Amino acid sequence: MEKILLKVISLVFIIFFGYFLKKISFFKKEDYKLISKIAINITLPAATIISFQNFDKNNSLIIFIFLGVFCNLILLQIGAFISRNKDNKTRALYIISSTGYNMGSFTIPFLSNILGPIGVIGACMFDTGNAPFCIGGAYAIANLYIKNSSAQNLKEILLKLFFSPAFLVYIILVILSFNDIKIPISFINFITPIGISNTFLSMLMIGMMFEIEFKKEYLTQSLSILGIRYLFASIMSLIFYNFLPFPLDIRKIITIIMFAPISGLSPVFVDKCNGNIGLAGFISSISIVISVIIMISLVFII
């Protein structure tokens, strides 16, 4: 547990280190855009390839893929409903920040250290359904709500999503995995220095985006979005833990996953919708702190 706590503290430190570097003008305010471009298009695809090297097909856990899709779709609809009377920028914030689970850079390493291989398999299966929403799916759907997009606009958005490097790599890897095709170990070794930097860049990026004005409306929006997120997590975890037809170890995995932090990429896509990136970064950062406390507590409780 000491090892896990040190890793958690390290992640939180990188976030605040990024914020500190921005505040002392080591980074310019807009430098996060370069970091996010590197993370989304280079290090995230590399990290995804590396993580799939240890992915073992388990047909009994295929339902986790559908749970990943289901949970994200419900959160999207809740975010859209709660923000239905708000302006477009605020709607984008609610829809995108309410959904997406930070799996690759946080939850999968967390479960790996605690539950071992079975935890990684379950988390990877869930992430198969979750990842498309994190790397552009939620952004595409948010555009439909805030712009009332036509079928042509939807087609353009989906094409951009499909041809984004991270999404394309993920789809290819899922297909390869279910056909028992492994990536050559020489290629894995070649890209490992790139992939292992993804967690650092993602956390640093969040810190650089972190900017909050303590206005009443900001506090209200933060509490509203985080309230949606963790109330939903509580309800679903109780249902999954008590009623899923799986052994106890498997039900423990999905229960913990429900409390995973908000995707670290959500501020990037909020910014693409001209939303409040500082507030989105703040919400994403706070969710890490809350999730750490809940997930560690669950390890002892269940």
Image: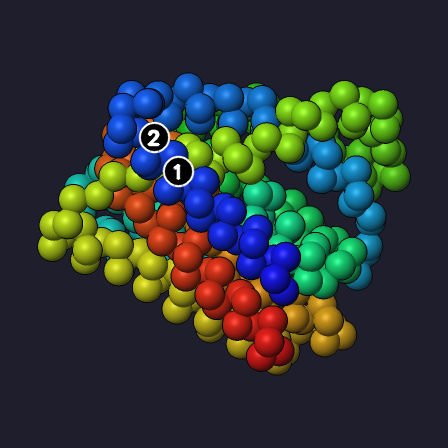
As rendered, which of 19 and 215 lies closer to the eye?
19
**Image spot of residue 194 (x, y percent):** 64, 24
Label 2 sits on a secondary structure element that is helix
Residue bearing the label numbered 2: 21
> Residue at image x 87%, y 34%?
181
Quick one: label 2, few (<14), some, or many (20+) residues within 10 Å?
some
**Image spot of residue 238 (x, y percent):** 53, 76
From the viewer's perspective, is residue 203 above or below residue 102?
Answer: above
Q: CB atoms at circles 1 and 2 under 8 Å apart?
A: yes
Q: Which mark is residue 228?
A: none
Amino acid at circle 2 = Leu
As rendered, which of 35 and 102 lies closer to the eye?
35
> Residue at image x 50%, y 40%?
134
From the viewer's perspective, is residue 222 above or below residue 203?
Answer: below
Amino acid at circle 1 = Phe
Q: Which image quadrant is residue 193 in? A: top right
Residue 287: tell me if it is visible.
yes
Q: Which mark is residue 17?
A: 1
> Residue at image x 34%, y 30%?
21
Label 1 sits on a secondary structure element that is helix
**Image spot of residue 196 (x, y percent):** 64, 33
**Image spot of residue 82 (x, y percent):** 27, 57
Quick one: label 1, few (<14), some, or many (20+) residues within 10 Å?
some
As rendered, which of 171 and 157 lies closer to the eye?
171
Q: How many marks?
A: 2
Q: In which quadrant of the rendered image does the N terminus lie?
A: bottom right
| Residue farthest along the left direction in this orientation | 216
> Residue at image x 78%, y 45%?
55
As rendered, which of 197 and 281 lies closer to the eye?
197
Q: In which quadrant of the rendered image does the C terminus lie?
A: bottom right
Left or right, residue 132 beside residue 62: left
